[in-house]
Image (cartoon, helix red, strand yellow):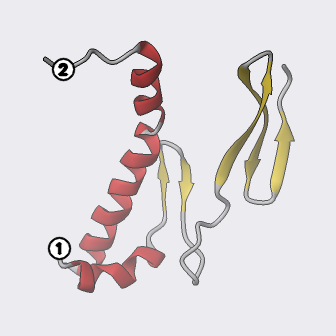
Amino acid sequence: MRARKSRREILKLHGYAPAAYDATWVLINAMKKANSTDPKVYGPFIKSVAFVGISGDIAFMPNGDMKDPAATFYKVIDGKWVPQAVAYGEKVSPLQN
């Protein structure tokens, strides 16, 4: 019998869903541009993909890094992860807690 997942485990899995969804569409768009499902053919097209995803703007720099990636900074306060700031590229915006 499989053990039932805790609420925390379920939320943790769902927390990555937007990024996974957007990553899937990065690959789909690269495949469309390359007119191929062969990774060796569509791989070079990944850097040319740009669209508005559910996690934000998705685009890449010539070296393959994400252009203006988003990140949330947390601080552990009384044993809980509390968001402190959000960064988009080089712009960091503090959050009001």
Task: Decide if residue 6 is on the left or right side of residue 63.
Answer: left
Residue drawn 55% across the image and 71% down it: 60
Given residues 94 and 34, the one toward you in this image is 94
Q: Amino acid at mark 1?
A: Thr
Which residue position is annotated with label 2? Answer: 2
Kind of element beneath mark 1: loop
Q: Is residue 80 above or below residue 42?
A: above
Give the quarter of the figure containing the C terminus: top right
Q: Is residue 34 above or below residue 9?
A: below
Q: Residues within 10 Å of mark 1 (few under 14, many from 20)?
A: some
Image coords of residue 51 (percent x, y): 47, 59
Quarter where residue 74 is shown: top right
Residue drawn 27% across the image and 15% down it: 4
Give the quarter of the figure containing the N terminus: top left
Q: Is residue 41 above or below residue 28?
A: below
Residue drawn 34% across the image and 56% down it: 25
Image coords of residue 86 (percent x, y): 75, 41
Task: Decide if residue 31 is on the left or right side of residue 20.
Answer: left
Q: Amino acid at mark 2?
A: Arg
Which residue position is annotated with label 1? Answer: 37
Task: Decide if residue 34 is on the left or right side of residue 94.
Answer: left
Image coords of residue 66 (percent x, y): 58, 66
Task: Decide if residue 10 is on the left or right side of residue 73.
Answer: left
Kind of element beneath mark 2: loop
Image coords of residue 15 (percent x, y): 48, 32
Given residues 71 and 54, the one toward you in this image is 71
Disc 2 or 1, which lies upstream in sequence? 2
Q: Nearer the viewer, mark 2 or mark 1?
A: 2
Q: Is residue 27 above or below residue 43?
A: above
Marks 2/1: CA–CA distance: 35 Å
